[in-house]
Image (spheres, rainbow, N blue to C red):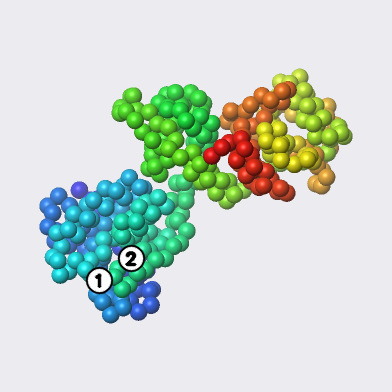
Amino acid sequence: MMTIDGYKSERETVERLLEALRELPDVDVSAPLMEPAQNHADYRLDAEIEFSAGGRNHFLLVEVRKSVYPRDAQQILWQLNRYVADTHAERKKQVVPLLAAESISPGAKDLLKSENCGYFDTGGSLFIPARGAYIYIDKPPPKTLQKSVRGLFRGKRSQVLHALLIRHGEWFGVKELAEFAEVSPATASETLSALERFEWLTVKGQGPSKERRLADPGALLDEWQKQTLAARRQAYRRFYVPAGDTDAIAHRFADTCGRLGLDYTLTEQYAAQTYAPFLSSVSRVACRLAFGSRVNELYAEMEARPVNEGANLDVIETRSHGEFLFRERVGQLWLASPVQVYLDLLRSGGRGKEMAEHLRRERIGF
């Protein structure tokens, strides 16, 4: 049974759709018919809207949802197509099925568009493939979808994504993935469910034996790239160390961290150059350092002097153990995983973006 809040939400989405239609030039819109009479007892259409454009009348058969992902879109298309199939032949040419929602994922939009099904989201995107009145307005996703996607790439959930990318060819159960990503089973399960909605996962089995693996690791990394570029950069402490070239600084830093029992991982240009050489040389070392009582002792031993310009050591001090996951030992140094180095390079300045794409092509491979 539809709740009062649910009905109110549907009405609000339909009202937003009407506003979008009325703002179009040379388009006249009639009042909507909410929950019109149905031919299918097991399926109730949410609204029917008549509008005229280009000298023709058209009827939008509107299904309203809160949020839609590709899997939802498949089911909705099947229902709408059943309804359209039972429409009288002489009216069929005027009918356009349309899905209206607070948010519709990019993958769902692509699917609806390929099937000539209209859509509208409350961010203002509108697609109506009507004969003689083809309408396509593409706007940024509404904040509800942006927030949902952004949350996947932060905190503990990002550790699950990182784990899946590191071992992208493998199948995982929830418990196994939770242990590898060092998160709770609940966090792993919630993250996997969200990734399924975006169809980034392949699934096999059911119940406790259900397993998933990434269907397209490149698509997931592309989305993480977008989120990284849109987010604020982590705060650095910048130092000048009188220790010669970057190799000397990196090894001295690693040795000192080892003696003091501090976790660290090298990243950005120095790490990328180690994984997949690209430049003749790099001018600074960037790293993550576990915050602790002996951090200042580390800086004192290295004679590291805080500077605003001319730094050759950039440090991100962090209390999050998750930022050291999947690091790799190369010689005497700990390097962040190639995936983490790639993401860090994107906002590092200089030739960072070029190095990021080189690293992705030569080392990451997707």
Residue 182 image offset from top left, x and y in percent: 51, 26
Where does label 2 land, which residue?
128
Answer whether residue 234 is visible to the viewer in this image.
no
> How far is the residue under mark 1 from the one under mark 2?
10 Å
Name which residue lies at 84% across and 34% down. Answer: 245
Q: Quickly name the residue at label 1.
A: 58
Q: Quadrant of residue 261?
A: top right
- Write the residue at 33% across / 45% down: 71
- Between 250 and 290, which is closer to the camera in this rendering? 250
Q: Secondary structure at mark 2?
A: strand
> Dot 2, crowdedness within 10 Å: few (<14), some or many (≥20)?
many
- Number of disc labels: 2
Q: Quadrant of residue 88?
A: bottom left
Neighbor class of circle 1 (other Cα within 10 Å; few <14, some 14-19, many 20+) is many
Tell me the kind of residue under disc 2: Ile
For label 1, the SS is strand
| Residue 72 spot, x, y in % from top left | 31, 47
Front position in the image: 64 or 98: 98
Image height check: is 134 above or below 214?
below
Vertical side of 86 occupied by 244: above or below: above
In this rendering, position of residue 290 left or right of residue 160: right
Which quarter of the rendered picture does the C terminus lie within?
A: top right
Residue 83 appearing in the image: yes
> Left or right: where does residue 75 sit relative to residue 143?
left
